[in-house]
Structures are given as C-alpha cells and as structure tokens.
Image (cartoon, rainbow, N blue to C red):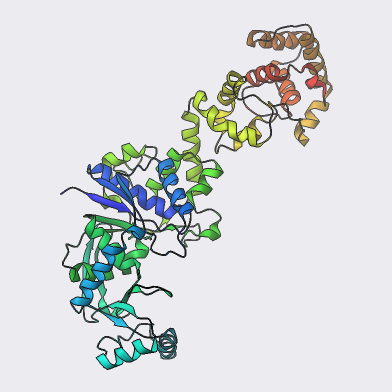
Amino acid sequence: MTVRVRIAPSPTGNLHIGTARTAVFNWLFARHHGGTFILRIEDTDTERSRSEYTENIKSGLQWLGLDWDEGPYFQSQRLDLYRQGIQTLLDQGLAYRCYCTSTELEELRERQKALKLAPRYDNRHRDLKEEDRAKYEAEGRKAVIRFKIEDDRTIVWQDQIRGKVVWKGSDLGGDMVIARTPENATEAFGQPLYNLAVVLDDIDMCITHIIRGEDHIANTAKQILLYEALGATVPEFAHSPLILNSEGRKLSKRDGVTSIDDFRQLGFLPQAMANYMTLLGWTPPDSTQEIFSLDQAASTFTLERVNSAGAKFDWAKLDWLNSQYLHQLPPEELVDLLIPYWQEAGYQFDPVGDRPWLIQLSALIGPSLTRLPDAIKESHLLFGEKVTLDEETSVFLQQSEAQEVIKAVVQALEATTTFTEVEAKEIIDNVTKTQKVKKGLVMRSLRAGLMGELHGPDLIQSWLLLHQKTWDKTRLLQH
Ligand code: GLU
C-alpha cells in the first residue's frame, strides 16, 4: 500500500499553529513511508474563505519546509463530485430533504434544553409524506439534505494514536446535514458541508491515513458512517493531541500568538519552529534527542510514539531551540536574516558596501541571540546609537581610576592612524602598565565607556567594529 495523506486547511484565517503541527505529522508520516503528502484547500464556505488566507497557508507551509507532492486542490472546484455523492445518497434512501425552518429547530432546542437533554435533531422529516413535501415546497421553504444516522449504531475504530475508540450513533446529534441550499441558489443543494465533502475527497484522492486534531473525533464517527454508505474502504484514523496553553486550555487567539506568521514575526527560525512542533506530541525513539531536522525526524517517525495527552506549549523550550539554531548559523547566513531588523530599527548602513562589517557584527552578536529581533538591542551601540548608562555603569565610570584609564586610552588612540586587533591589544597592555592598574580594570573601563554597560559580547571585537564604522575617538569621553 502506498501511503497517501493530506492536510486540509480551511482558508478562513492565517496558517494556525495547530494546523501547521498537523501538517508536520502528516509530512513526517508520508516521508517516513515514501508516501504522498497532499494539500487540499477546503474552501466550500464561500463567505469566510479568502484567497489571501490560501496564500498565507501555502507560504507558511513552504517556510516551514513542508513541501507537498500534490495540490493544492480546491474544494470549490470540485462541487460536481459532491453533488453526485449527494444524489447517490438520496437515490439510495440514505439521505433525505428536511424542510424544517430555523424557528422550528430553535423551538426543538429550547424544549430539549428545558428537559436538560443534549440538543439533537429529532429526525422529524425523515419519512415525510409526499403531500407534506409538496406543501413545504409550495411554501417556498428551502430544504437541507440530511444523512440518516441510526441511534442504535455503534461506531468503532482503532485509532493509530489513541487506540480503540467507540462512539454511539445516538451521541451524534440525529440525522446530520450534509448540504444546504444557500439563499439565491439555483441548485437544489448548492453547498455541500464539511463532513460530506471531506469524505468524498478522501475517497477520490485515495487517502490511506487521516491524521488530524482530536477536535475532529466526533466528525470521524460521522464520516465512518458516510464511508460505509458510499461503499468505500474506511481509511486509518489518527487523532493528534491538542496544543494547550500554560493553563492547560486549548491554545487560542487569547494567548496572543497562534498563527505561523506571528511566530515568524517574533523572530523564530523555520527550522526551530518545525523542530519544536514535532516535539509537541511526538517523542523520538532516543528520547534525549531534542534537536533534529524534519528529514531526521521523518526517518524515525511513527504514530505510536505520538502521545494522546494534550501537548503544553512551552515558550522557554521554543526559545532554547531557536537559540540553538541561531548559534549554529554561519555569520554569512545570519547577516541576511538580521539586515531587515536593523533596517527596520532605522540604523544607518549600506547592506552591500558594509557587508563585511555586518558579517563581523553578526559573528559578534550571534551567540547572544535568542530571537532575531534581539539583534536590534544587541547591536544598537555599534551602529552609533547614543550610549545610555545604567546605574551600575555610571557609578563605575565616576571612579577616578576609570576616568584616568579612559583618558589614557583616548590619548593612545589619538596617536594612532590605524586600528587593528594587534593595536587594540597593545593599547590595553600599555595603559595597564602606565596606569599601574589591573588589566581587568582597563577592560571594564573600556567596555563601560564604549558600550555603556559592564557585560556584553567580546570587547576587542566590539571596539574594532565600532571604530571601523565610526572611527569616533571621542566616544569614550561622552560620559
Ligand atoms: N478543513 C478541516 C479543518 O481545517 C479539515 C479537517 C480534516 O483534516 O478533515 O479543520
């Protein structure tokens, strides 16, 4: 059997982290089995679907490295398939037209609520007499198509992540709507609904494994009934755990960030995001292994190692992973990721002419970055921004020893016409000797004077970069 899986997002919003994680699992599963990963855009909801969301979904998947082998297919271009399917179910008496108005359904729900019953359709139009149907048609009522669900049915499947799942037909809310007729529609059943379209597509696309979020479990029970009604082989199902926030609730808009774009804008690298999402629910066979590429994960990925319990979103872990990836990047690559942030911060530089300097700067600050925008703060002084001293540095610089050191360094600098690493080190050594102080004091005074802080990246490199860019000898006297 050739494995065929799909990711089937609805373009009603930007690519969500939950959808992206489902895409990761599908991609890993396909690649592990040498199978096919399909992208299908579920855009039958014409009111809420937007092409810019489709573009966002595609670019988000590409950014993460989740290349698809087929598609994107668009449900909106496949309506004939769904109409044929609906007709087949109607012809076989497995589906029927229901003419209930929204007021009637509302009354039914109210009654059930008063009796403390779960809301469900009472199948009242299942066996409508011909004369009643004609009457409703004459009244101009618009019918929906309902698929029959028998209360005494038990639906069982062996979930590849959760094991055996049992669902009662009576818990599925009565006969389900599979298509409705939108206002102004000329077709008898213009708009197929999710459960029907998804099943017809999955059959048509020969999907072998359906890997999706556990919020679809009740849909799976309904869909299995549709597979049976349509005489199709039921695929394997695997329901992955939800992504939870720190309070154990489903990660949502209220948690601030949910779309892949949000994470991209916060300065996470795609490799770190993909790695982190893989770990949101999956444990590699070597459970100590935390850093891996998608290809590496694919080589050992199995659904058995996906946990069925909810996966807590851990910002600290994501930050840690991101820093690991950032620190591994060669400065020649890192620089291209940092340039847009420096530009946005308004720093003055020429991306082409200053490139060698920018690469050195990337090498200098790279090890201190957790997220890409950290580069703004880490490098603002080196771009000639004004130094503001914190309390500790200010007190330190007021000491006469530090003042003397700085004066001596400025004098030494004024006597030089070139400034290299060798000369920088010589100045430090000479000032240490002439001032009869410890070298550490000279270094600290220099750092405080140059950078306005007592801790930071390599001092000599910072000093060199600062002087290459501005050659501002008096900077040390600003305080
Ligand atoms: N369009 C559905 C969603 O975005 C697809 C669910 C499925 O994979 O069947 O949730």
Query: Splitting the image into 4 quarters, where does residue 470 fall?
Result: top right
Query: Is 59 on the left or on the right of 211, as rendered?
Result: right
Q: Residue at x 22, y 60 (%)?
A: 203
x and y percentages locating residue 52 in the rendered image = 48, 52
Q: Residue at x 78, y 36 (%)?
A: 391
Q: Quadrant of ligand 1?
A: bottom left
Q: Quadrant of the C terminus?
A: top right
Nearer-the-camera pick, 76 or 22: 76
Nearer-the-camera pick, 43 or 349: 43
Nearer-the-camera pick, 447 or 45: 45
x and y percentages locating residue 283 in the rendered image = 33, 47
x and y percentages locating residue 125 in the rendered image = 30, 87
User: From what the image shows, is residue 152 above or below residue 389?
Assistant: below
Query: Is 77 on the left or on the right of 429, as rendered?
Result: left
User: From what the image shows, is residue 16 above or below residue 112?
Assistant: above
Q: Residue at x 37, y 37 (%)?
A: 292
Query: Splitting the image into 4 quarters, where does residue 67 fall?
Result: top left
x and y percentages locating residue 107 in the rendered image = 43, 89
- Residue 177 visible to the viewer: yes
- Residue 240 visible to the viewer: no
Nearer-the-camera pick, 202 or 411: 202
How many numbered circles does the render carry? 0
